[in-house]
Image: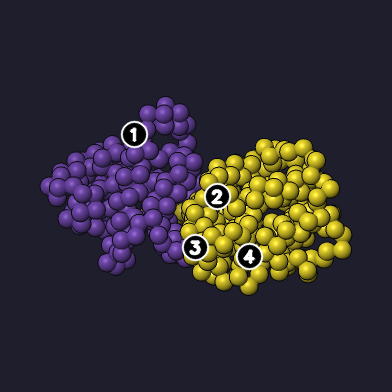
Chain colours: A purple, B yellow
Amino acid sequence: MRSEEEANRAIELYSDTVRRICLLHLKNDSDTEDIFQTVFLKYVLHTKAFENEEHEKAWIIRVTVNACKDLLKNFFHTKTVPLESLPEMALEMPEDNRDILEAVLSLPSKYKDVVYLYYYEEYSAVEISQILKKNVNTIYTLLTRARQILKVKLKEVTDIE
Amino acid sequence: MNDKWKETFDPIRAESSLKHHTKEYLAKKVYRKKGFLFFVYHRFAFAAVCLVFVFFAGSYYLYFFPTAFISIDINPSVELRINRYNQIISVEGYNDDGRLLADALEVKFMNYLDALNQILSDQSIQAYLSDDEQMSLTVAGKDQAQCSSILQTIESFVSNHKNIHCHAGNADEIHTAHALGMSFGKYQAFLVLQELEPSFTADEVKDLSMKEIKAFIEKYSKTDESSPSDATDTTEGSENQRQRHRHRYGQNRSEN
């Protein structure tokens, strides 16, 4: 088990990344808090050493994505969770950025992580395939389809190619 | 376009309250819980050690606390201390011959009957018995039921020996007897003699053999031979026991 100091360091280092992935999938603060607790509890209990910070970050991303999927799959959760609007910080964004965020959030769930990891975190398709444990070709396919959807939603989407 | 993505997602940050709640959750769920478990574990370990100690102390007490005594007096005076499981836990000699015999005997943790058999088989005891000495086996202890059972058993065991006589002793007199430096079996004989002839002192009697004490009892009890016999009741009080012993010593005398 990792020490409390290690846990606090990881929270400071990766909580923004975890928060962004939560934003992609979850619609209220309570669920986000649940995911934070799940992810960092798993981190504390994960005794295997990481090769470096990149490896550690990739592990955190994979655990967060899986935790979000697990939460959304929960039958009780799907029937009871109320919808909330975008977080305050998103409302304060310039309109262009808010449009991008809303367009990404409106994507089907299977495209959100790929798009976020590719465009914001700047991982390659190969790296994304390793993080999400998916075939590289699947990642390419998901990226292509996500671009097509975003193209419709955003005029600027052509620039992302 | 990457700048647009950066501008879009950069402002999305984990709220400080979210980080704080997560740290609190981990502290409560993992770290303080560990401390609590550690505390509980130590308390449990301490309680377990105490229980083990109590168990062993209790077992030690049950095993090594004497509940019955057999005083064997002929010339050697020895006492067998018997636990509630009818096993010998110690042998004490109360005169020089008794101490020699106690040192030579290997009867510890043996059943009292096996121990008695070994004592009666001892060469020195055999020599005394063949020399027409009188052996007295006196049983006393706090556990009346156990003492009665032991007395009955040894009475049956020595029934073929005409010069071995069994008596029930008084547990309350054991400490007094030891304080006077004699076995409680010999002390009981001394009390009988002293009752007949008050001028006798413990110092005078403690080095006498049982045969010699009985000879004195016989000598001083000639006027007391009309007392009724009560050979079967061995669980009465001190005074009755004393009366019974006096009669028995008289009876034994007449038998011999």
Of the numbered discs in the image, which one, if any, rests on residue B249? none
Residue B116: x, y in percent? 53, 54
- At mark 1, the secondary structure is helix
- Residue at image point 55% right, 44% down: B159
Marks 4 and 2 close (CB-CB < 8 Å):
no
Observer-nearest of B95 and B41:
B95
Q: Mark 1 and mark 4 in contact? Answer it, CB < 8 Å.
A: no
Front position in the image: A122 or B224: B224
Quick one: which residue is furthest to the right in this view? B198
Q: Position of residue A123 (x, y in %)?
A: 24, 58
Spatial distance from mark 4 to mark 3, Cα to Cα? Answer: 13 Å
N-terminal-most mark, 4 or 3: 4
Q: Chain of mark 4?
A: B
Residue type, mark 3 in image: Asp
Category of crowding for the residue at label 4, using alpha-carbon neighbours closer than 10 angstroms: few (below 14), some (14–19), many (at least 20): many
Determine whether label 3 and label 2 are within 8 Å by CB.
no
Residue under pointer 1:
A73
Q: Which of the two labelled residues, at mark 3 and mark 2, occupies the earlier sequence position? A: 3
Label 2 to label 1: alpha-carbon separation: 94 Å
* Residue on which disc 4 sits: B75
Residue B72 in sight here: no
Depth check, mark 4 against mark 2: the one in front is 2
Residue depicted at x 19% and y 51%: A129
Splitting the image into 4 quarters, where does residue A67 fall? top left
Q: CA distance from mark 3 to mark 1?
A: 89 Å
Report helix, strand or loop for mark 2: loop
Q: Quadrant of the N terminus of chain B?
A: bottom left
Q: Position of residue A125 (x, y in %)?
A: 18, 54
Question: Given the image, on which type of amino acid does mark 4 rest?
Answer: Asn
Which label belongs to residue B122?
A: 3
Do circles 3 and 2 both sit on a common chain? Answer: yes
Residue annotated with mark 2: B161
